[in-house]
Image (cartoon, rainbow, N blue to C red):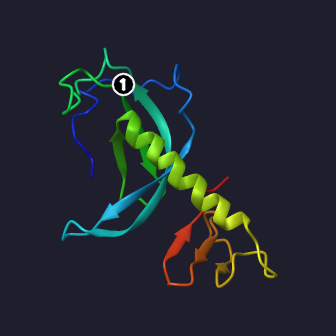
Amino acid sequence: PPRGGGGGGSIWRTDGSDYIGVRVRRSVLGEDGKPAGAANGKITGWLPSDQSDFYNKDTGQPAALWHVEFQDDEIGDEDLEENEVLAGISAYKKLAAALSATGPSGLPAGWKRIPRDDQGHYQYVAPGGTTFRTLAA
């Protein structure tokens, strides 16, 4: 969930971090606090530790934050610490690898692709029924 106020009213920087523009995948929690799905997003900005008002709960030290905008407007955006960024990048790469491991239909076994919507997104339906939507190019 968003931390709220992580940026301290500062303007997010769009240079100086190799993570800018990188795609991530994050778990989405339901109202009961349990995982309810996942969302894909893109890192659009960051604040170094000397500009962020966020402190790492374990060390008590100022921590850099990266701002993610999710493709699903209902989820919105989230500010992440570096360990969360790295986990999100890894999860997105796993999804991308699964989507590229194609079967006869061009998709992983049991997957279905729904044609592009008016925003240029494809939707994929996994064997268990979970739906994923691509980011538009």
Which residue occupies 56% across, 67% down?
Answer: 133
Residue 27: % across, % down: 38, 60
Work out whether 5 lies above or below 89. above
Q: Is residue 74 visible?
A: no
Which residue occupies 42% across, 28% down?
Answer: 46
Instruction: Name the outermost residue toward the right.
Output: 104
Residue 71: % across, % down: 49, 56
Residue 109 located left or right of residue 53: right
Residue 98 located left or right of residue 82: right
Foreground of the two, 117 or 82: 82
Question: Secondary structure under badge 1?
Answer: loop
Work out whether 8 lies above or below 116. above
Which residue occupies 47% across, 41% down?
Answer: 86
Disc 1 marks which residue? Answer: 11
Amino acid type, residue under disc 1 in the picture: Ile
Which residue occupies 77% across, 78% down?
Answer: 103
Q: Quadrant of residue 83?
A: top left
